[in-house]
Amino acid sequence: MNTETLVKKNIEIKVDEKILLKVLTQNDVSESYVEWLNDYEVTKFTEQKYFRHTLESTKTFVCQKYDSESDLLFGIFFDGTHIGNIKLGSIKFEHMSTEVSYFIGEKEFWGKGIASKCVETVVHFAVTELDLKKINAGYYENNTGSAKVLQKCGFVVERNIISNAIFEDKPINFIFVGYVPN
Ligand SMILES: CC(C)(COP(=O)(O)OP(=O)(O)OC[C@H]1O[C@@H](n2cnc3c(N)ncnc32)[C@H](O)[C@@H]1OP(=O)(O)O)[C@@H](O)C(=O)NCCC(=O)NCCS
């Protein structure tokens, strides 16, 4: 698969019997999706907390990612219901590397192993279908859930940037992790 195939974006990935990843289109942008983005509990470990999101801004974001030749923005669908997102991008085909980022917006789905399964599946897709040789990710040091997800999926800590972000008025470290396929 290459950039040309990415433009088509008709990609669906089955994670298990209940979970499906589908490239998002603007038709997937719902009031719930916008509510997740404006929910401090969901976004507090991400830069999204600094923005006020609307249906319009979210549709614009989804369309930009859909049209992009270097991003794959998947919705996480559980039994057909959109519950969160996982993104590969930007994909640097010249360096065969990318970043992965994710959130589960519907909080009742937290702690059920969904993010771990989705990250594992998307990393496998990136390696086998896109032929990428490196997947990067990062998290605020106090985001224990995300740290565990990435560790479980085979990511290793590459860099700890001291006092790189302010979290609830206190400086905290930012951790960069990476996955290299065998
Ligand atoms: C962080 C997040 C993605 C975790 O998703 P999830 O589907 O709940 O994660 P999983 O169920 O796969 O959990 C993986 C492990 O982390 C643990 N975990 C999950 N959330 C945790 C939390 N808040 N505190 C401590 N441990 C947590 C789970 O117990 C599990 O551990 P185990 O394998 O030892 O049982 C989810 O809470 C979320 O979307 N948060 C808001 C957005 C966000 O932080 N995104 C990541 C930015 S880097």
Image (cartoon, rainbow, N blue to C red):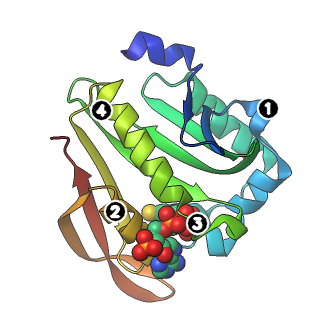
Label 2 crowd (10 A; few <14 / some 14-19 / many >=20): some
Q: Residue at x 51, y 57 (%)?
A: 115
Residue shown at the point (66%, 45%) measured from the top left: 18
N-terminal label among 2 and 4: 4
Q: Which residue is denoted by mark 4 in the rendering?
A: 127
Mark sitting earlier along the chain (1/3) = 1
Q: Is residue 147 visible?
A: yes
Q: Nearer the viewer, residue 25 or 18?
A: 18
Q: Which quadrant does the C terminus fall into?
A: top left
Find disc 2 in the rendering and name its residue.
152
Residue type indicated by callout 1? Asn
Horizontal side of residue 40 vs 174, given as left or right: right
Q: Is 153 rendered above or below residue 174?
A: above
- Quadrant location of the N terminus? top left
Q: Is mark 2 within 8 Å of ligand 1?
A: yes
The residue tagged 1 is 27
What is the distance, in whole Å, between disc 4 and disc 1 at their CAs?
29 Å
Residue 46 visible from this viewpoint: no
Farthest residue to the right: give it. Answer: 31
Tell me the SS state at disc 3: loop
Q: Amino acid at mark 3?
A: Lys
| Callout 1: SS | helix
Residue at image coords 61%, 68%:
110
Residue 118 spot, x, y in % from top left: 49, 48
Gap between marks 4 and 3 measured at Cα? 25 Å
Q: Is residue 42 left or right of residue 72?
A: right
- Mark 4 vs 1, N-terminal side: 1
- The secondary structure type at the circle numbered 2 is helix
Q: Quadrant of residue 25?
A: top right
**Alpha-carbon distance for marks 1 and 3?**
27 Å
